[in-house]
Image: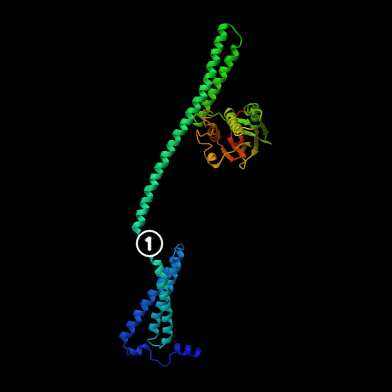
Amino acid sequence: MLDWLNGFLGMRGLPPHGYCLLWDPRLIWTHVAADAVIALAYFSIPLVLWRLLQARRDIEFGWMVALFATFILACGTTHLLSIYVLWVPAYGVEAAVKVVTALASIATALLMLPLLPKLIALPSPSQLRAVNERLVVEAQERERTEEMLRQSQKLEALGRLTGGVAHDFNNLLQVITGNIERAQRKAARGEDGVERALAQALSGTERAAGLTDQLLTFARRQPLNPRELSLNELLERIAPLIRGALGTEIALVIDPAQGDDTIVADGPQLDSALLNLAINARDAMPDGGRVRMAITPADDPDTITLLVSDNGTGMDAKTLERATEPFYTTKPLGQGTGLGLSQVYGVAEQLGGKMLIESTLGRGTTVRLLLPRAARAGQSREKI
Protein backbone atom coordinates (compact mmCIF):
# COMPACT_ATOMS: atom_id res chain seq x y z
CA MET A 1 0.00 0.00 0.00
CA LEU A 2 2.81 2.35 0.89
CA ASP A 3 4.66 1.44 -2.29
CA TRP A 4 1.54 2.17 -4.34
CA LEU A 5 1.04 5.48 -2.58
CA ASN A 6 4.68 6.44 -3.10
CA GLY A 7 4.42 5.52 -6.74
CA PHE A 8 1.19 7.45 -7.16
CA LEU A 9 2.49 10.59 -5.52
CA GLY A 10 5.97 10.28 -7.05
CA MET A 11 7.11 11.68 -10.38
CA ARG A 12 7.49 8.31 -12.15
CA GLY A 13 9.50 9.90 -14.98
CA LEU A 14 6.59 11.88 -16.41
CA PRO A 15 7.43 15.16 -18.11
CA PRO A 16 6.34 18.40 -16.45
CA HIS A 17 3.39 20.32 -17.87
CA GLY A 18 5.71 22.93 -19.36
CA TYR A 19 7.06 20.29 -21.68
CA CYS A 20 3.56 19.87 -23.13
CA LEU A 21 3.51 23.60 -23.76
CA LEU A 22 6.84 23.33 -25.56
CA TRP A 23 8.24 25.68 -22.96
CA ASP A 24 6.71 28.58 -24.80
CA PRO A 25 7.35 31.58 -22.46
CA ARG A 26 4.08 33.24 -23.43
CA LEU A 27 2.02 30.19 -22.49
CA ILE A 28 4.11 29.39 -19.41
CA TRP A 29 3.89 32.84 -17.83
CA THR A 30 0.27 33.35 -18.83
CA HIS A 31 -0.57 30.16 -16.90
CA VAL A 32 1.60 31.26 -13.97
CA ALA A 33 0.05 34.75 -13.76
CA ALA A 34 -3.54 33.54 -14.12
CA ASP A 35 -3.18 30.69 -11.60
CA ALA A 36 -1.33 32.94 -9.14
CA VAL A 37 -4.07 35.62 -9.24
CA ILE A 38 -6.82 32.98 -8.91
CA ALA A 39 -5.01 31.33 -5.97
CA LEU A 40 -4.55 34.69 -4.25
CA ALA A 41 -8.25 35.46 -4.63
CA TYR A 42 -9.24 32.00 -3.35
CA PHE A 43 -6.98 32.34 -0.28
CA SER A 44 -8.28 35.84 0.54
CA ILE A 45 -11.93 34.74 0.56
CA PRO A 46 -11.55 32.35 3.58
CA LEU A 47 -9.79 35.14 5.51
CA VAL A 48 -12.77 37.43 4.92
CA LEU A 49 -15.20 34.66 5.93
CA TRP A 50 -13.17 33.90 9.06
CA ARG A 51 -13.25 37.58 10.04
CA LEU A 52 -17.02 37.61 9.46
CA LEU A 53 -17.53 34.60 11.75
CA GLN A 54 -15.39 36.21 14.45
CA ALA A 55 -17.36 39.46 14.33
CA ARG A 56 -20.80 37.86 13.93
CA ARG A 57 -20.97 34.80 16.15
CA ASP A 58 -24.76 35.01 15.94
CA ILE A 59 -24.81 33.90 12.30
CA GLU A 60 -27.12 30.88 12.17
CA PHE A 61 -25.29 29.07 9.36
CA GLY A 62 -21.75 29.58 10.59
CA TRP A 63 -20.82 25.94 10.03
CA MET A 64 -21.89 26.31 6.39
CA VAL A 65 -19.63 29.32 5.98
CA ALA A 66 -16.71 27.36 7.48
CA LEU A 67 -17.31 24.43 5.09
CA PHE A 68 -17.47 26.78 2.13
CA ALA A 69 -14.18 28.37 3.25
CA THR A 70 -12.55 24.89 3.29
CA PHE A 71 -13.76 24.27 -0.26
CA ILE A 72 -12.33 27.63 -1.42
CA LEU A 73 -8.96 26.88 0.21
CA ALA A 74 -8.77 23.56 -1.62
CA CYS A 75 -9.55 25.29 -4.92
CA GLY A 76 -6.78 27.81 -4.32
CA THR A 77 -4.31 25.02 -3.57
CA THR A 78 -5.09 23.30 -6.91
CA HIS A 79 -4.15 26.48 -8.76
CA LEU A 80 -0.85 26.72 -6.89
CA LEU A 81 -0.10 23.13 -7.84
CA SER A 82 -0.93 23.96 -11.47
CA ILE A 83 1.98 26.40 -11.36
CA TYR A 84 4.19 23.86 -9.59
CA VAL A 85 3.62 21.08 -12.16
CA LEU A 86 4.70 23.35 -14.98
CA TRP A 87 8.29 22.52 -13.91
CA VAL A 88 7.85 19.54 -11.56
CA PRO A 89 5.69 16.55 -12.64
CA ALA A 90 3.96 16.11 -9.23
CA TYR A 91 0.74 14.96 -10.85
CA GLY A 92 -0.08 12.52 -8.07
CA VAL A 93 -0.07 15.30 -5.45
CA GLU A 94 -2.15 17.46 -7.76
CA ALA A 95 -4.64 14.63 -8.23
CA ALA A 96 -4.89 14.05 -4.45
CA VAL A 97 -5.63 17.75 -3.82
CA LYS A 98 -8.26 17.69 -6.55
CA VAL A 99 -9.90 14.68 -4.87
CA VAL A 100 -10.05 16.61 -1.60
CA THR A 101 -11.48 19.61 -3.46
CA ALA A 102 -14.08 17.40 -5.14
CA LEU A 103 -15.18 15.88 -1.82
CA ALA A 104 -15.43 19.32 -0.22
CA SER A 105 -17.43 20.67 -3.15
CA ILE A 106 -19.86 17.70 -3.10
CA ALA A 107 -20.35 18.02 0.68
CA THR A 108 -20.93 21.76 0.37
CA ALA A 109 -23.44 21.32 -2.44
CA LEU A 110 -25.38 18.52 -0.67
CA LEU A 111 -25.56 20.41 2.63
CA MET A 112 -26.66 23.63 0.95
CA LEU A 113 -29.70 22.02 -0.70
CA PRO A 114 -31.75 21.70 2.56
CA LEU A 115 -30.81 25.26 3.47
CA LEU A 116 -32.14 26.68 0.22
CA PRO A 117 -35.74 27.25 1.48
CA LYS A 118 -34.42 29.01 4.59
CA LEU A 119 -32.09 31.17 2.53
CA ILE A 120 -34.93 32.09 0.19
CA ALA A 121 -37.11 32.97 3.18
CA LEU A 122 -34.58 35.47 4.53
CA PRO A 123 -36.03 38.98 4.29
CA SER A 124 -34.57 41.42 1.83
CA PRO A 125 -33.24 44.85 2.89
CA SER A 126 -36.40 46.51 1.54
CA GLN A 127 -38.57 44.11 3.57
CA LEU A 128 -36.52 44.83 6.69
CA ARG A 129 -36.93 48.56 6.15
CA ALA A 130 -40.69 48.12 5.74
CA VAL A 131 -40.90 46.08 8.96
CA ASN A 132 -38.79 48.68 10.79
CA GLU A 133 -41.03 51.51 9.58
CA ARG A 134 -44.10 49.57 10.70
CA LEU A 135 -42.56 48.99 14.14
CA VAL A 136 -41.80 52.72 14.44
CA VAL A 137 -45.43 53.54 13.65
CA GLU A 138 -46.66 50.96 16.17
CA ALA A 139 -44.29 52.34 18.82
CA GLN A 140 -45.60 55.85 18.23
CA GLU A 141 -49.19 54.61 18.47
CA ARG A 142 -48.32 52.76 21.68
CA GLU A 143 -46.79 55.93 23.13
CA ARG A 144 -49.95 57.86 22.28
CA THR A 145 -52.05 55.14 23.89
CA GLU A 146 -49.89 55.17 27.01
CA GLU A 147 -50.14 58.96 27.19
CA MET A 148 -53.94 58.72 26.94
CA LEU A 149 -53.88 56.09 29.68
CA ARG A 150 -51.75 58.33 31.89
CA GLN A 151 -54.17 61.20 31.35
CA SER A 152 -57.04 58.89 32.20
CA GLN A 153 -55.26 57.79 35.36
CA LYS A 154 -54.67 61.44 36.31
CA LEU A 155 -58.37 62.16 35.84
CA GLU A 156 -59.22 59.09 37.90
CA ALA A 157 -56.81 60.22 40.62
CA LEU A 158 -58.29 63.71 40.51
CA GLY A 159 -61.74 62.17 40.94
CA ARG A 160 -60.55 60.19 43.96
CA LEU A 161 -58.98 63.34 45.38
CA THR A 162 -62.14 65.36 44.83
CA GLY A 163 -64.31 62.69 46.46
CA GLY A 164 -61.99 62.19 49.42
CA VAL A 165 -61.36 65.87 50.10
CA ALA A 166 -65.03 66.76 49.66
CA HIS A 167 -66.02 64.01 52.10
CA ASP A 168 -63.42 65.11 54.67
CA PHE A 169 -64.28 68.78 54.39
CA ASN A 170 -68.00 68.01 54.56
CA ASN A 171 -67.46 66.12 57.81
CA LEU A 172 -65.38 68.95 59.23
CA LEU A 173 -67.92 71.58 58.19
CA GLN A 174 -70.66 69.56 59.87
CA VAL A 175 -68.59 69.48 63.07
CA ILE A 176 -67.98 73.25 62.87
CA THR A 177 -71.53 74.30 61.98
CA GLY A 178 -73.12 71.82 64.38
CA ASN A 179 -71.10 73.05 67.33
CA ILE A 180 -71.63 76.72 66.43
CA GLU A 181 -75.39 76.13 66.24
CA ARG A 182 -75.26 74.30 69.56
CA ALA A 183 -73.33 77.20 71.09
CA GLN A 184 -75.90 79.68 69.74
CA ARG A 185 -78.79 77.71 71.24
CA LYS A 186 -77.09 77.36 74.60
CA ALA A 187 -76.18 81.06 74.62
CA ALA A 188 -79.77 82.05 73.78
CA ARG A 189 -81.10 79.87 76.62
CA GLY A 190 -78.39 80.92 79.03
CA GLU A 191 -77.23 77.33 79.41
CA ASP A 192 -73.71 76.11 80.19
CA GLY A 193 -71.53 74.36 77.63
CA VAL A 194 -71.08 77.22 75.18
CA GLU A 195 -67.30 77.21 75.58
CA ARG A 196 -67.12 73.46 75.01
CA ALA A 197 -69.15 73.68 71.80
CA LEU A 198 -66.99 76.52 70.53
CA ALA A 199 -63.83 74.58 71.42
CA GLN A 200 -65.07 71.62 69.38
CA ALA A 201 -65.85 73.94 66.49
CA LEU A 202 -62.35 75.41 66.74
CA SER A 203 -60.91 71.90 66.75
CA GLY A 204 -62.78 71.23 63.50
CA THR A 205 -61.33 74.35 61.90
CA GLU A 206 -57.84 73.27 62.96
CA ARG A 207 -58.36 69.86 61.39
CA ALA A 208 -59.56 71.56 58.20
CA ALA A 209 -56.46 73.73 58.26
CA GLY A 210 -54.36 70.59 58.70
CA LEU A 211 -55.95 69.02 55.63
CA THR A 212 -55.23 72.20 53.67
CA ASP A 213 -51.62 72.08 54.87
CA GLN A 214 -51.37 68.51 53.57
CA LEU A 215 -52.52 69.66 50.15
CA LEU A 216 -50.13 72.61 50.16
CA THR A 217 -47.21 70.52 51.38
CA PHE A 218 -47.85 67.92 48.71
CA ALA A 219 -47.89 70.68 46.10
CA ARG A 220 -44.75 72.15 47.75
CA ARG A 221 -46.51 75.49 48.15
CA GLN A 222 -46.48 75.39 51.94
CA PRO A 223 -43.28 77.02 53.25
CA LEU A 224 -41.52 74.95 55.88
CA ASN A 225 -39.85 76.39 58.95
CA PRO A 226 -36.87 74.10 59.58
CA ARG A 227 -35.22 74.40 62.98
CA GLU A 228 -32.96 72.28 65.13
CA LEU A 229 -34.95 69.78 67.13
CA SER A 230 -34.38 66.59 69.09
CA LEU A 231 -35.94 63.50 67.57
CA ASN A 232 -36.17 61.86 71.00
CA GLU A 233 -38.12 64.86 72.33
CA LEU A 234 -40.30 64.91 69.22
CA LEU A 235 -41.26 61.25 69.60
CA GLU A 236 -41.86 61.69 73.32
CA ARG A 237 -44.13 64.66 72.65
CA ILE A 238 -46.15 63.06 69.87
CA ALA A 239 -46.36 59.55 71.38
CA PRO A 240 -49.68 60.16 73.27
CA LEU A 241 -51.33 61.50 70.11
CA ILE A 242 -50.11 58.52 68.07
CA ARG A 243 -51.25 56.03 70.73
CA GLY A 244 -54.69 57.63 70.62
CA ALA A 245 -54.79 57.35 66.83
CA LEU A 246 -53.66 53.70 66.89
CA GLY A 247 -56.25 52.56 69.41
CA THR A 248 -56.03 49.94 72.13
CA GLU A 249 -55.49 46.95 69.82
CA ILE A 250 -52.17 48.22 68.46
CA ALA A 251 -49.03 48.55 70.57
CA LEU A 252 -46.61 51.42 70.00
CA VAL A 253 -42.92 50.72 70.60
CA ILE A 254 -40.45 53.62 70.54
CA ASP A 255 -36.70 53.08 70.36
CA PRO A 256 -34.96 56.41 71.07
CA ALA A 257 -31.64 57.46 69.63
CA GLN A 258 -28.41 56.66 71.42
CA GLY A 259 -26.23 59.74 71.06
CA ASP A 260 -26.76 62.83 68.95
CA ASP A 261 -30.38 63.00 67.76
CA THR A 262 -30.51 66.63 66.65
CA ILE A 263 -31.86 67.21 63.16
CA VAL A 264 -32.99 70.16 61.09
CA ALA A 265 -36.71 69.93 60.32
CA ASP A 266 -40.09 71.59 60.56
CA GLY A 267 -41.53 70.23 63.82
CA PRO A 268 -45.29 70.50 63.07
CA GLN A 269 -44.90 69.11 59.56
CA LEU A 270 -42.79 66.21 60.85
CA ASP A 271 -45.45 65.57 63.52
CA SER A 272 -48.05 65.44 60.77
CA ALA A 273 -45.89 63.10 58.69
CA LEU A 274 -45.44 60.67 61.61
CA LEU A 275 -49.16 60.78 62.37
CA ASN A 276 -49.92 59.95 58.72
CA LEU A 277 -47.54 56.99 58.85
CA ALA A 278 -49.13 55.79 62.08
CA ILE A 279 -52.64 56.03 60.61
CA ASN A 280 -51.52 54.09 57.51
CA ALA A 281 -50.04 51.42 59.78
CA ARG A 282 -53.26 51.27 61.82
CA ASP A 283 -55.37 50.79 58.69
CA ALA A 284 -53.05 47.96 57.62
CA MET A 285 -53.67 46.11 60.93
CA PRO A 286 -57.45 45.74 61.33
CA ASP A 287 -56.95 42.88 63.81
CA GLY A 288 -54.31 44.68 65.87
CA GLY A 289 -50.54 44.50 65.86
CA ARG A 290 -47.48 46.57 66.62
CA VAL A 291 -46.01 49.83 65.34
CA ARG A 292 -42.35 50.54 65.97
CA MET A 293 -40.75 53.96 65.72
CA ALA A 294 -36.98 53.94 65.99
CA ILE A 295 -34.12 56.39 65.51
CA THR A 296 -31.09 54.74 63.94
CA PRO A 297 -27.83 55.91 62.32
CA ALA A 298 -27.65 56.10 58.53
CA ASP A 299 -24.82 55.21 56.17
CA ASP A 300 -24.28 58.93 55.57
CA PRO A 301 -22.81 60.50 58.76
CA ASP A 302 -24.68 63.73 57.97
CA THR A 303 -28.00 61.88 58.04
CA ILE A 304 -30.08 60.14 60.70
CA THR A 305 -32.86 57.63 60.04
CA LEU A 306 -36.34 57.83 61.55
CA LEU A 307 -37.94 54.42 61.05
CA VAL A 308 -41.64 53.56 61.24
CA SER A 309 -42.57 49.90 60.80
CA ASP A 310 -45.62 47.70 61.28
CA ASN A 311 -46.48 44.01 61.01
CA GLY A 312 -49.66 44.56 59.04
CA THR A 313 -50.91 43.33 55.70
CA GLY A 314 -48.08 44.93 53.72
CA MET A 315 -48.21 45.85 50.04
CA ASP A 316 -47.69 43.92 46.84
CA ALA A 317 -45.16 45.11 44.26
CA LYS A 318 -47.76 46.99 42.19
CA THR A 319 -49.14 48.88 45.18
CA LEU A 320 -45.65 49.62 46.50
CA GLU A 321 -44.65 51.09 43.14
CA ARG A 322 -47.53 53.58 43.33
CA ALA A 323 -47.51 54.15 47.10
CA THR A 324 -46.22 57.74 46.90
CA GLU A 325 -48.19 58.57 43.77
CA PRO A 326 -50.44 61.60 44.33
CA PHE A 327 -54.02 60.71 45.23
CA TYR A 328 -53.39 56.97 44.95
CA THR A 329 -55.19 55.05 47.69
CA THR A 330 -56.44 51.51 48.22
CA LYS A 331 -58.98 52.69 50.79
CA PRO A 332 -62.70 52.97 49.97
CA LEU A 333 -64.00 56.26 48.61
CA GLY A 334 -64.34 58.84 51.35
CA GLN A 335 -61.93 57.10 53.73
CA GLY A 336 -58.72 58.54 52.33
CA THR A 337 -57.46 61.22 49.97
CA GLY A 338 -54.31 59.40 48.86
CA LEU A 339 -52.17 62.26 50.12
CA GLY A 340 -50.76 60.65 53.27
CA LEU A 341 -47.55 59.15 51.88
CA SER A 342 -47.32 61.90 49.27
CA GLN A 343 -47.29 64.46 52.09
CA VAL A 344 -44.60 62.51 53.96
CA TYR A 345 -42.56 62.25 50.76
CA GLY A 346 -42.95 66.00 50.13
CA VAL A 347 -41.81 66.91 53.66
CA ALA A 348 -38.74 64.64 53.42
CA GLU A 349 -37.75 66.08 50.04
CA GLN A 350 -38.24 69.70 51.13
CA LEU A 351 -36.02 69.10 54.15
CA GLY A 352 -33.26 67.76 51.92
CA GLY A 353 -33.85 64.16 52.97
CA LYS A 354 -35.37 61.02 51.47
CA MET A 355 -38.17 58.58 52.11
CA LEU A 356 -37.62 54.86 51.46
CA ILE A 357 -40.35 52.22 51.66
CA GLU A 358 -39.94 48.46 52.06
CA SER A 359 -42.99 46.22 52.17
CA THR A 360 -43.80 42.53 51.91
CA LEU A 361 -47.33 41.31 51.38
CA GLY A 362 -48.57 39.66 54.56
CA ARG A 363 -45.52 40.66 56.63
CA GLY A 364 -45.69 44.42 57.04
CA THR A 365 -44.21 47.71 55.90
CA THR A 366 -41.17 49.75 56.91
CA VAL A 367 -40.81 53.45 56.06
CA ARG A 368 -37.43 55.13 56.55
CA LEU A 369 -37.10 58.90 56.66
CA LEU A 370 -33.49 59.94 56.06
CA LEU A 371 -33.24 63.40 57.61
CA PRO A 372 -30.30 65.85 57.73
CA ARG A 373 -28.48 66.23 61.04
CA ALA A 374 -28.15 69.67 62.59
CA ALA A 375 -24.40 69.84 61.83
CA ARG A 376 -25.23 69.69 58.15
CA ALA A 377 -27.13 72.97 58.26
CA GLY A 378 -23.95 74.91 58.97
CA GLN A 379 -25.63 77.50 61.16
CA SER A 380 -27.18 77.79 64.59
CA ARG A 381 -30.93 77.36 64.81
CA GLU A 382 -33.45 77.58 67.60
CA LYS A 383 -33.83 74.25 69.31
CA ILE A 384 -37.34 73.11 70.25
Establish if 4 lies above or below 80.
below
Q: Is residue 307 visible?
A: no
Residue 253 sits in which quadrant? top right
Asked whether, in this view, residue 114 is left or right of residue 219, the answer is: left
**Coloration of the structure image:** rainbow
Mark 1 falls on what kind of element? Answer: helix
Q: Residue at x 54, y 25 (%)?
A: 210
Q: Amino acid at mark 1?
A: Ala
Residue 327 location, x and y as percent? 50, 33
Q: Nearer the viewer, residue 304 or 247?
A: 247
Q: Nearer the viewer, residue 307 or 196?
A: 196
Residue linked to disc 1: 121
Q: Nearer the viewer, residue 342 or 123?
A: 123
Q: Is residue 320 visible?
A: yes
Q: Residue at x 54, y 39 (%)?
A: 319
Q: Nearer the viewer, residue 109 or 270?
A: 109
Label 1: how many Cα within 10 Å (few below 14, some 14–19, many 20+): few
Residue 111 location, x and y as percent? 42, 71
Residue 315 location, x and y as percent? 57, 39
Q: Residue furthest bottom?
A: 13
Q: Residue at x 36, y 88 (%)?
A: 17
Q: Residue at x 51, y 25 (%)?
A: 167
Establish if 51 lies above or below 7.
above
